[in-house]
Amino acid sequence: MRVPSPHPNHNPTNNVVNLNTVYPLGTELDVNYHLFSLLTACWSINSNCLTMASAGPLYLGFDLSTQQLKGLVVDSSLRKVHEAKFDFDADSQGFDVKKGVLVNEAEREVFAPVAMWLQAIDTLLTRLKENGLDFARIKGISGSGMQHGSVFWSADAEQLLAQLQPEKTLQSQLDEAFAHPFSPNWQDASTQKECDEFDAILGNQSQLADATGSKAHHRFTGPQILRFQRKYPDKYLKTYRITLVSSWLATMFLGKFAPFDISDVCGMNLWDIKAGKWNEKLLALAAGPSGVKVLQKKLGDVPEDGGIHLGSISPYFVKRYGFSSDATIIASTGDNPSTILALPLRSNDAMVSLGTSTTFLMSTSEYKPDPATHFFNSPTTAGLYMFMLCYKNGGLAREKVRDAINSASSNIQDKNSWEAFDKHLLSTAPFAQSNPSEPLNLGLYFPRPEIIPNLPVGEWHYSYDPETDKLIRTNGVPESPTQDARIIVESQFLSLRLRSRELVSSPAPSLPPQPRRIYLVGGGSRNSAIAKVAGQVLGGSEGVFKLDVGENACALGAAYKAVWAIERDGSKGETFEELIGKRWREEEFVEKIAEGYDPDVFERYGAALKGFERMETELLKEYQQH
Ligand code: XUL
């Protein structure tokens, strides 16, 4: 059981030390940060200070995602100083991957060659060196790995890692380090049978979600291990250790096996979050004939502290790239937990990633698991959890409506323009109501099979009267495709509101429960019309903000985690939110792009939730019968 943080709701913003202010005696200042602020100021006034400032510590965050390995370096003041990437499709040699993975359609398997990631590490570090990075200044290294993916290491691995010769590449020396050359990817869908067994073993999906934070999912590591040990019994026996992608990264830099991270371990369907230990029944299921003890040994321990210092960097990197031998390896976490570390996200703040798919992330002290959602331990702060909703349909579904609007108009030259979509999104009344006494228009638009709710490809429309609770199936919105712009965006945000409403609290005594701030990331975050509707549906008492870090959120979160782990004041139990909150320069990193909470319209969307939920339930029943 993790000990709750003393300050889970600590307000970290507006806490940056002002160099022109005389602080009263006894004011608690972060000494390290203060020093580096002074150095930075000094650097701009007097170039003689340059050597001093440029000798400060640096922190390296990796992001090993489906399509690339990225490395990003920040200083103690969270300023980005270097960045490089290795794109698997474009840069790898000898691997015939598409979008970073290999696919076996017949079994719905998706996996990545681990050797390709080894190639990526050496090339990426070479690029950072060419970029001018002085590796000797790196004090801490952490990483972000795509969640759920597993790596199966052989019994020779640790010896091979310990004997790495700096004049040779990792790829050329670690051939024998893996019991299986591939890592199952989060897009893999080969484990339906295993998921059914996971969902059943504790009783039902809700009980599995209560214990592990999620019902069984194809991509989760427990069902993947179960399938692996059945499909490859010999390789399973030869597997000495299993890591996640995140702990694989930490292992590589540590030169010996790194434990799972306290947050990423929750993406396995094996870890009992409340009890803070492995669930024996689930382990026994995944382990098969060789038994729980054998699997537990392959999995290793899970330290509670997300900022744990795992040890010094492997000599390979010291000799080959010039890292200092005391550069410390910090536990790496999953890409979604890492994303919430790209800013000092407070309890009751929400992050919405508007990419090809949609992800909703919240930091919360409430643990309220449900089969439709995910809970993970916070990657840094005991007593906090990360709540996650993961949709398959997002940007692509909106693009489909955009394309229909653009094709219907002969005046639109640029068929990829969002101008007409945005215009109709804002000029159409909420629910495309012609007047407030008419029923509301609701719809679901799924060009890809959806997880939340579990429905096939399709588009469905309903009208709903909140006064009478009457829900009727319709053929579409009155004016299609223009009004679809409003209905699809409302639909996507209504689904988020429905599923997060039990978690949000009142940001102020006079306000209804809602997030305090909504941070948008990903491609869709550039669209201020979508941001406006996000605020209307979801609220956001302080507004809707765009986190302007491009594709860097995960790597940045990893680098910030390293800053916190090394520079935190252990004697005071300084939390990630406290330390990063003090150093984060809000005006540089985020931009307010919409007002957020609007009382009248917020209430109208609230009244529609019952109809929205009924629409989903009706469709779920209809499709379960098929
Ligand atoms: C989350 C998930 C993906 C991966 C890859 O459950 O499967 O977001 O983490 O990004």
Image (cartoon, helix red, strand yellow):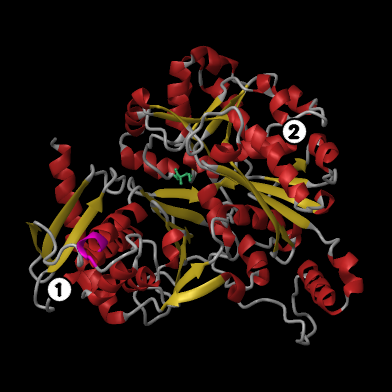
Which class describes the residues within 10 Å of circle 2: few (<14), some (14-19), or many (20+)?
A: many
Which circle, 2 or 1, is nearer the viewer? 1
Relative to the observer, which residue lies in front, 336 or 95? Answer: 95
Q: Residue at x 32, y 56 (%)?
A: 399
Indicate whether 22 appears above or below 415. Answer: below
Dot 1 alpha-carbon crowd within 10 angstroms: few under 14, some 14 to 19, many 20 or more: some
Q: Amino acid at mark 2?
A: Gly
The label on residue 433 is 1
Whether residue 383 is visible, yes or no, is no
Q: Is residue 354 visible?
A: yes
Tell me where the magenta segment starts and ends, as one range: 406-410
What percent of the width, then of the height, locates residue 131?
75, 52
Tag 2's secondary structure? loop
| Residue at left offset 30%, top offset 80% | 599
Q: Is residue 517 above or below residue 204?
A: below
Identify which residue, 532 or 614, lies in the foreground: 532
Q: Position of residue 169 (x, y in %)?
A: 74, 30
Residue at mark 2? 255
Say which quadrant the C terminus sits in: top left
Spatial CA distance of label 2 from label 1 is 62 Å
Q: Residue furthest top?
A: 234
Q: Position of residue 533 (x, y in %)?
A: 32, 71
Residue drawn at the location 83% of the way across and 72% of the way down? 39
- 626 left or right of 413? left
Answer with the quarter of the image where residue 531 lies.
bottom left
As drawn, is 467 to the left or to the right of 548? Answer: left
